[in-house]
Amino acid sequence: MGDNGGGNQAMKASADSMLTVADKAPLTFKRKVRSDLDVKLAKPYLARAIAAPDWDNVDGSWGCHKHHNMSVLQQHVAFFDQDDNGIIYPSETFKGFRDIGFNVVACLFFAMLIHGAMSYATLPTWLPSPHFPIYIENIHKCKHGSDSTTYDTEGRYIPANFENIFSKYAQTKADKLSFKELWQMTDANRNAFDFFGWIASKLEWGVLYMLAKDSEGFLSKESVRRCFDGSLFEFCAKMQKGYVDKND
């Protein structure tokens, strides 16, 4: 009897250790996480250095997108490096935003804001630069708090954390976020007293929403994933030039 009781306790402890909801934490019911990711996506908890996979794209982006042996975070910004020298200047950021479809005023605002906030953290010296360059090699130093934690502190991509964005907050459509759901997600990710992170997260997701929302006002999971590895920007630039159809 004693052995059987001990075995039952061990089984219960094992089952409890895998629960993703807690009775006294209602948010764990409201914001559910997927427990079946490893059925299709190998080691979803493993931070990927080069690829950005998800449930529907287990190998990440493929085809025209090249990773050039950069981290996923580096790939995210590499589109704006117009001359491929590893350094992004405000003029290149301005042109990049123009290439993907934003107007002149928005492009000027984005270039000033991004380089004003991020340039110094990426510089290889302690001395500031009047040219406000962003060094892609050091872009991981620009990772801020109150984000989705899809990027780790070295710029790798964590599939499980990406999937959690949609399992927790995509309540209307499983693979899309409405603006309200996006807003709720950025609110939920806030760290205490992290004012810079709060603002940065709202702005980043807001710009993505403006860029990639569909005709019904939803931001698709695929657009978000492709934003993380930068392939979305390449696609939007080609679409602006008429090389691809928006529905491809």
Image (cartoon, rainbow, N blue to C red):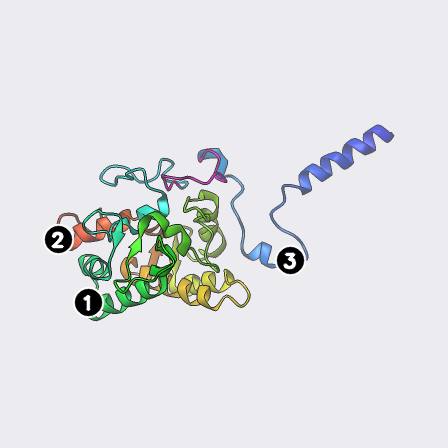
Q: Which region of the structure is painted magenta? A: 41-53
x%, y% of residue 13? 72, 39
Q: Neighbour class for label 3 at 10 Å: few (<14), some, many (≥20)? A: few
Write the residue at 28% across / 58% down.
Answer: 133
Secondary structure under the numbered disc 1 in the rendered image:
loop
Marks 3 & 1, CB-CB < 8 Å contact = no
Q: Which residue is mark 3?
A: 25
Label located before the other in sequence (3 or 1): 3
Amino acid type, mark 1: Asn
Write the residue at 24% across / 61% down.
Answer: 90
Label located before the other in sequence (2 or 3): 3
Q: Which residue is mark 2?
A: 241
Q: Vertically, is 168 above or below 113?
A: above
The alpha-carbon separation of the residues under discs 2 and 3 comes to 50 Å
Q: Which residue is mark 1?
A: 103
Left/right of residue 244 with respect to residue 153 in the rendered view: left
Amino acid type, mark 2: Lys
